[in-house]
Amino acid sequence: MFATIRGFTSLQRTPQADLKLGSVLAFVAGATNAGGFLAVGQYTSHMTGILSSVADNLVLGQLALAGAGLGAVLAFLLGAMTTAWLVNWGLRHELRSAYGLPLMLEASLLLVFGLFGAAISLLGVFLPLTVVLLCFIMGLQNAVITKISRAVIRTTHITGLLTDCGIELGKLLYVNRQPGQPPVRANRDRLRVHGQLIACFFLGGLAGALGFKYVGYISTVPLAALLLLLVLRPALDDWQRLRTA
């Protein structure tokens, strides 16, 4: 079991390992996004919509709302930047858990949200603080799989995945009737990969919404535990190596 899990975040990558990790992260992203909506009334992976709302609110003179939206966008950007910093630092120091460092940070933040969300909700800063936190987590996570898979897989941008699926389905259903012309062929592997990621995001969304509805903030704790499980073996290897160095 641990040998299989180790491959999810190992430095030696394969397309199969990327897809496994991407599927898990898509599930986590869907759960966090859906559960976060029930907590704060806003989806936090949808930067297109948030940035559009900034423009709308600026035109309408709603400067406070525009500032909040801009803060969410900047938090997502900072999350992606943090992933780049952590991964490159880990690679420079030859850590086997280099790709897992951002996931450890994400797990820690989800634990904070899950364990202290109810207490923080009593404070007046709960809503903006939670939106910024969740946007940071989304940027952090999406950059992890983007960097690992060399931008082949993303886990929070379902619009792009649906677009790619539509393109491949269009090719799949195209009727090749022109003799002498190269046939139009769908990339079935890409269609399968994108379909799997979309399904995992949707299932994660169901799990996150149900979890938050019935048990509240604590529902994010299993998500944090899942992320830590992915990183545990490489992190322990680094710990043992540093102790014996």
Image: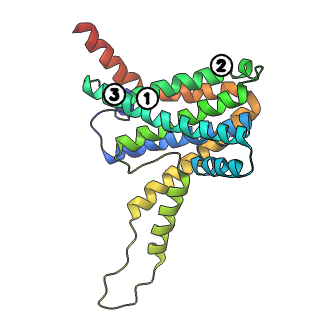
Instruction: Determine whether, in the image, residue 243 is placed left or right of residue 57.
Output: left
Q: Amino acid at mark 3?
A: Ala
Real-space CA distance between mark 2 and mark 1, rounded to the nearest whole angstrom: 20 Å
Which is nearer the eye, 9 or 51? 51
Which is nearer the eye, 51 or 93? 51
Instruction: Determine whether, in the image, residue 159 is placed left or right of residue 143.
Output: right
Residue that appears at 63% across and 46% down: 50
Residue 230 drawn at (x, y percent): 43, 29
Residue 86 seen from this side? yes
Which is nearer the eye, 17 or 87? 87
Residue that appears at 60% across and 25% down: 221
Mark 1, secondary structure of its residue: helix
Instruction: Determine whether, in the image, residue 235 is placed left or right of residue 206.
Output: left
Q: Which of the two discs, 2 and 1, sits closer to the camera?
A: 1
Residue that appears at 65% across and 51% down: 55
According to the image, label 2 marks what residue? 115
Res. 102 mark: 1
